[in-house]
Image: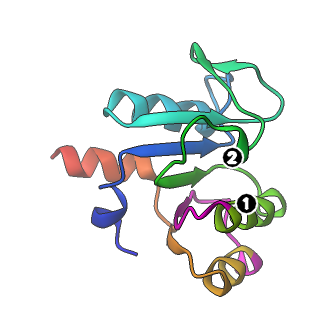
């Protein structure tokens, strides 16, 4: 899937969102929220991120996101990819460091549209011009 079409999705989940300001899960959630996306944080270890209720898993979200940004290690990412497929979420963005051969093969096998090897924060900056 190309980046331009992926960024047309308006409702997102960020799996791996965190309250730690120095981590990418925090920065990505913040940048996407500030860019006007409806974004839901997903992290089973937290109650909230940046003042928003945080959810333990994708199935707990109050709405089905159009796309999921994955900011977790590949060993966790494979389970997230499975959850996306089970819920009917077709668009996933694998942040650098969250992808590996196993995750990519699984996403392909499950028919998901994937963006990888690109950071959404950089792409949003480019899109702003």
Picture quadrant of residue 54: top right
Task: Please rate how many residues cluster around mark 2, counting C-alpha atoms within 10 Å: few if below 14, some from 14 to 19, many from 20.
Answer: many
Q: On the picture, is 67 further left or further right than 59?
A: left
Residue 58 — which label? Answer: 2
Residue 108 lies, in percent from the top left, at 61, 84
Which one is in front, 96 or 42? 42
Residue 8 — which label? Answer: none
Task: Please rate how many residues cluster around mark 1, counting C-alpha atoms within 10 Å: few if below 14, some from 14 to 19, many from 20.
Answer: some
Q: Residue at x 81, y 57 (%)?
A: 76
Q: CA distance from mark 1 to mark 2?
A: 7 Å
Which one is in front, 66 or 96? 66
15 within the magenta span: no
**Magenta span:** 87-102
Q: Residue at x 37, y 37 (%)?
A: 37
Which one is in front, 98 or 53? 53
Residue 26 lies, in percent from the top left, at 59, 30
Q: Are marks 1 and 2 in contact (CB under 8 Å)?
A: yes
Which structural element holds mark 2? helix
Which structural element holds mark 1? helix
Q: Residue at x 43, y 44 (%)?
A: 11
Q: On the picture, is 4 further left or further right than 77?
A: left
Picture quadrant of residue 3: bottom left
For the N terminus, the image quarter is bottom left
Residue 39 lies, in percent from the top left, at 48, 35
Q: Vertical placement of 50 versus 84: above or below?
A: above
Residue 105 lies, in percent from the top left, at 69, 84
Which residue carries the number 1 mark? 83
Upstream in sequence: badge 1 or badge 2? 2
């Amino acid at each position: 899937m190309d980046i331009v079409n992926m960024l047309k999705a308006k409702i997102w989940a960020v799996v791996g969102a965190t309250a730690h300001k120095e981590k990418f899960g925090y920065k990505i959630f913040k940048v996407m929220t500030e860019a006007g996306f409806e974004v839901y944080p997903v992290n089973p270890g937290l109650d909230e991120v940046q003042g928003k209720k945080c959810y333990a898993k994708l199935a707990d979200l109050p709405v089905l996101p159009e796309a999921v940004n994955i900011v977790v290690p590949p060993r966790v990412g494979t389970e997230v990819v499975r959850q996306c497929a089970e819920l009917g979420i077709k668009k996933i963005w694998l942040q650098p460091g969250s992808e590996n051969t196993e995750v990519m093969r699984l996403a392909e096998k499950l028919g998901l549209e994937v963006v990888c090897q690109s950071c959404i924060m950089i792409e949003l900056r480019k899109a702003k011009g």
